[in-house]
Each structure stands twice: as C-alpha cells, then as structure tokens.
Image (cartoon, rainbow, N blue to C red):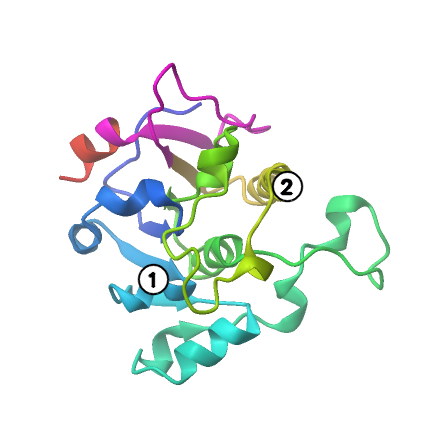
Amino acid sequence: MMNVPNLNKKTAFVIGNGKSRENVQLENLRNYGTVFGCNALYRDWYPDYLVAIDPDMIGEIENSDFPKERFIVPPLDEQYEPPEIYSLPANVSTPRSNAGMNAMSEAVKMGFEQLVMIGFDFIVASEDVSMSNVYADTVNYGPETKTSFHDAARRMHYLNWFVDQHENVDFYFTYPTIEGGTTIWEFACEKTVGGLNFEEFHKIYK
C-alpha cells in the first residue's frame, strides 16, 4: 500500500456510517478538503455534499432542511453495481450499490485527486466490525436494510473494480485497530490504495 496522503492534493473525504468514524471530528476535515457524506449523516452534521440511493432515505432527506443543492441522488443506473463487474450483459440486473461507493463516484466525477474514506468498515474482515452502523435500528435503518458478512465481501469486489477504473486517483481507507490485530480484505491495486489506522489519521488531520 501507499504511504500517507498528500496534503497538497485536491482531497475529498468520504464519510461512511460504520461505527469506527464515531471519534472523528468531522468539522475539522473542512480544513483539508471537501466532505461527502452518506444517508443519515445529516441528522448529526451537515457535510458539503450528501449522497443517498435508498428510496426511504431519499424521501427523509428531501423532507428535511438539508440544502437541496448539496443533496445528490445518482441516476437510477448508477444505483446498481455495474454489470461489467460480473461479466454480465447490460440488461441483466445486478445487486444494489451502496451510498458510500456512490459518494466516491461523485467525488471522482468532480475531479478530486485523492479520496480519504472514513467509516467504510466493510473493508475489515471481522463480522462484528464490517456490519456495524452508527444508525442501526433507527428510522429507515430497520432489519431490511442490514447487510450481511457476505455483502461485505461482495462490496470489496465492487470496490476493487472501482479503484482499477480510476488509476489517476489515490484512495486512502481508515480502519479501526482491533485487539489482536486488524485484518483487512485484500486490495487488488496497491499502487493507488493506502491504509491508515486512526492514530495515523489523527496525526495528519489534526
């Protein structure tokens, strides 16, 4: 994996809702770049841009006072994983995407050179960690929205494919430190992917 992020690059922070992000002071990140958030993050803090693809979550946000011009609902075809990931014809349905991946895509579209992901806990090969969510069991986060450990592995497949499509962008993923050591799912492209535990992260983004 690469070393630490470059503070001179145009940076986007993409905030997932895994529990590992709970101790990050999100407001401080504005000093270093633009912040993209997902789904219910706005309940606690307003990012620069908010992304959602779940119909119920979209409805909730549209009925809130979050600024409409900063709320992104991707086109319907982008709300599903691309068929080419699975070598399927374009007319064959694929699994739903997830808001974190869509937020990464929106950041790349806007020309950010470096993405730093926080709270993307599905990269950790631990069932308890990978399935965590700050908003579990709240409105629009019922049993029907919960992911499985199998979903986490599939998301990694999608993530690896996405990174390969954007070789001119650097991707950094934060991860929690777990007693006994942290195991992260394998990244296929180490030339453009880096990892940071939170101790390293806080040294850079003070």
Query: Range of the magenta residues?
Result: 174-199
Magenta region's main secondary structure? loop
Task: Indicate the position of residue 120 as horizontal and vertical percent values.
Answer: 43, 43
Q: Amino acid at mark 1?
A: Leu
First in residue order: circle 1 vs circle 2: 1
Residue 170 sits above or below residue 73 on the image: above
Q: Amino acid at mark 2?
A: Trp
Task: Indicate the position of residue 80 as horizontal and vertical percent values.
Answer: 67, 60
Task: Indicate the position of residue 138 as horizontal and vertical percent values.
Answer: 41, 63
Q: Which mark is nearer the camera, 1 or 2?
A: 1
Please report the residue visible at 43 percent of the width from the left and 55 percent of the height from the top: 136
Residue 41 marker: 1
Residue 159 marker: none
Q: Mark 1 and mark 2: span between their CA atoms?
A: 26 Å
Q: Quadrant of the N terminus?
A: top left
Residue 121 sits above or below residue 189 on the image: below
- Residue 182 within the segment the image draws in magenta: yes
- Residue 46 within the segment the image draws in magenta: no
Reading the image, the residue beneath label 2 is 161
